[in-house]
């Protein structure tokens, strides 16, 4: 695009009518500023280049290519440490489903957290680097017989039972292997976590756990207590994800602790453990206001103590499962701009589509949940006027959107590098090969040193799977 066309384009954008925008989105006073969504220590250098973990994203893009996921190891470790310190006396399990690799499993181990896995392959990843099986919990609503046997043979610290069939399957496996299996029972509390329906997991009408209605959860506890080979430890609850307050946890804790009391009254046995799951939200846009981890702990601790006293329960072993809250802000997605296209809409407004070289294959969340993200021009400083944009991918879908609504400088052009904040969680872990895309590499950075911890998939990788 010529300099004349760039200048004309910028003026046109300054004078154009904006399309409908969400109420939370305001015109930024400084498009070069970085907000709370970015990793701690993320800065711009003298030329305006975004630097994460002491590394220039432009240099990372040149070395590793784009699309690219950059993971700030220092930021990850600091957030993990903060959860352990704030929840001192609790068991803190990192939710591996947010993002897990061998390197991340090592970081989690070294920072003293437990690890929550949801599949046999996640378990195998942790075991491959010597993660202590006793600090692993195993979730899942449809664990296969092979996965259950794998977990019991490895000696995982706890298995979260999700259905009646699992009780009998675990009993048979325990008998065959001559082991006792420590279990929690997952219950659905009917709490509305005020989040997207696909990530709200405590309503009765969904696939996880035993409902508190019709005493199904109590019956599951009694069954685990009476089944040979099982060592029932307590109750597990998870109300959803991306939650910004502890109000929903208040109701969930009350109901799960009522269940503990009902089990005590029915059997004379007092269970020792309560896991309140994860779900603490993070900032994806300036409008998001996540709870500080210290305040999150204070709120949950007060809720638990109030109900423990009310019901006359003894001391409880408490646990929590942050995932997104640790890895989400540590991750930055890096893309190269391919096309900048203004589209005049039927109402006369102009929406500018900025197309990048990734998309829904490396981040499905905007298409799946209408999730919002914040993007910035990462390769240079710009004093151009802001333009309202929609950042989209290169896939053959209208819903292939990475940033539904945002602002970029009006001189954004092909070849520029864009960076999206808070991309550490549920991006690479939910990636696909749609349109034969290859999954992006993950590069860990810290103190100015980058290292690939997951390489980019290649076309050869995909063709090797194709048997013709």
Image (tube, grey):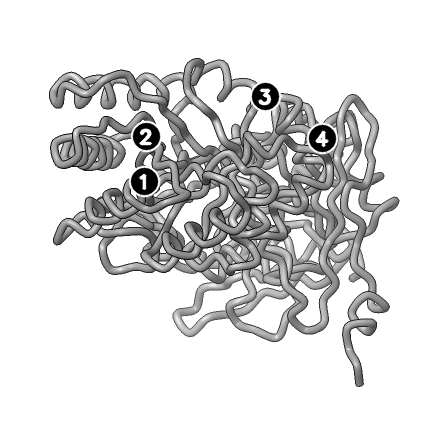
Give above or below for 384 relative to 318: below
Mark 3 burial class by Cα count in 10 Å: few <14, some 14-19, many 20+: some
Q: Quadrant of the N terminus?
A: bottom right
Q: Tell me the CA gap for discs 4 and 1.
A: 36 Å
Q: In the structure shown, which secondary structural element does the residue marked by tag 3 occupy?
A: loop
Marks 2,4: beta carbons within 8 A: no
Q: Which residue is drawn at 46% across and 61% down?
A: 368
Give the image location of residue 180, x and y in percent.
46, 39
User: Mark 4 or 1 closer to N-term?
Assistant: 4
Q: In the structure shown, which secondary structural element does the residue marked by tag 2 occupy?
A: strand
User: Mark 2 or 1 closer to N-term?
Assistant: 1
Q: Which residue is drawn at 74% across and 30% down?
A: 51
Tag 1 residue: 237
Give the image location of residue 66, x and y in percent.
77, 52
User: Mark 2 or 3 closer to N-term?
Assistant: 3
Tag 2 residue: 274
Q: In which quarter of the image is the C terminus?
A: bottom right
Q: In the structure shown, which secondary structural element does the residue marked by tag 4 occupy?
A: strand
Q: Tell me the CA gap for discs 2 and 1.
A: 8 Å
Give the image location of residue 457, x and y in percent.
79, 59
User: Mark 3 or 4 closer to N-term?
Assistant: 4
Q: Tell me the CA gap for discs 2 and 3.
A: 20 Å
* Closer to the camera in the image, 196 or 11: 196
Marks 3,1: beta carbons within 8 A: no
Q: Is residue 30 left or right of residue 302?
A: right
Residue 90 visible in the picture: yes
Tag 3 residue: 112
Please name which of the two marks, 4 or 1, marks the residue nearer to the observer.
1
Tag 4 residue: 52
């Amino acid at each position: 695009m010529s300099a004349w066309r760039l200048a004309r384009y910028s003026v046109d954008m300054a004078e154009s009518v904006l399309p409908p925008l969400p109420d939370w989105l305001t015109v930024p006073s400084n498009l070069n500023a970085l907000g709370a969504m970015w990793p701690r220590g993320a800065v711009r250098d003298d030329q305006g280049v975004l630097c994460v973990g002491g590394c220039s994203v432009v240099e990372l893009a040149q070395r590793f290519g784009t699309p690219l996921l950059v993971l700030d190891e220092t930021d990850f470790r600091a957030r993990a440490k903060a959860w352990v310190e704030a929840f001192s006396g609790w068991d803190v399990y990192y939710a591996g489903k947010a993002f897990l690799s061998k390197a991340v499993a090592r970081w989690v181990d070294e920072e003293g957290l437990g690890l929550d896995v949801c599949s046999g392959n996640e378990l195998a990843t942790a075991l491959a680097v010597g993660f202590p099986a006793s600090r692993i919990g195993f979730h899942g609503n449809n664990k296969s017989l092979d996965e259950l046997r794998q977990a019991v043979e490895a000696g995982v610290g706890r298995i979260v039972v999700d259905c009646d069939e699992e009780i009998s399957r675990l009993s048979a496996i325990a008998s065959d292997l001559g082991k006792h299996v420590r279990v929690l029972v997952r219950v659905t509390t009917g709490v509305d976590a005020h989040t997207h329906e696909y990530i709200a997991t405590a309503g009765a009408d969904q696939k996880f756990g035993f409902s508190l209605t019709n005493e199904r959860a109590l019956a599951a506890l009694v069954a685990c207590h009476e089944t040979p080979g099982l060592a029932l430890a307590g109750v597990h609850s998870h109300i959803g994800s991306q939650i910004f307050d502890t109000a929903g946890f208040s109701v969930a804790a009350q109901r799960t602790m009522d269940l503990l009391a009902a089990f005590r009254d029915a059997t004379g046995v007092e269970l020792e453990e309560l896991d309140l799951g994860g779900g603490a939200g993070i900032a994806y846009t300036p409008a998001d206001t996540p709870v500080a981890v210290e305040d999150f702990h204070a709120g949950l601790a007060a809720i638990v103590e109030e109900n423990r006293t009310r019901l006359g329960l003894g001391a409880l072993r408490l646990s929590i499962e942050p995932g997104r809250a640790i890895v989400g802000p540590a991750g930055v997605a890096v893309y190269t701009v391919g096309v900048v296209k203004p589209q005049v809409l039927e109402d006369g407004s102009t929406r500018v589509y900025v197309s990048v070289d990734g998309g829904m294959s490396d981040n499905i969340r905007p298409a799946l949940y209408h999730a919002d993200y914040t993007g910035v021009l990462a390769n240079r400083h710009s004093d151009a006027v802001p333009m309202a944009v929609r950042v989209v991918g290169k896939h053959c879908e209208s819903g292939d959107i990475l940033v539904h609504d945002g602002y970029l400088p009006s001189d954004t052009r092909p070849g520029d590098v864009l960076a999206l904040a808070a991309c550490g969680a549920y991006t690479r872990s939910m990636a696909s090969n749609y349109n034969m895309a290859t999954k992006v590499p993950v590069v860990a950075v810290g103190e100015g040193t980058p290292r690939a911890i997951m390489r980019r998939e290649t076309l050869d990788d995909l063709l090797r799977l194709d048997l013709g």
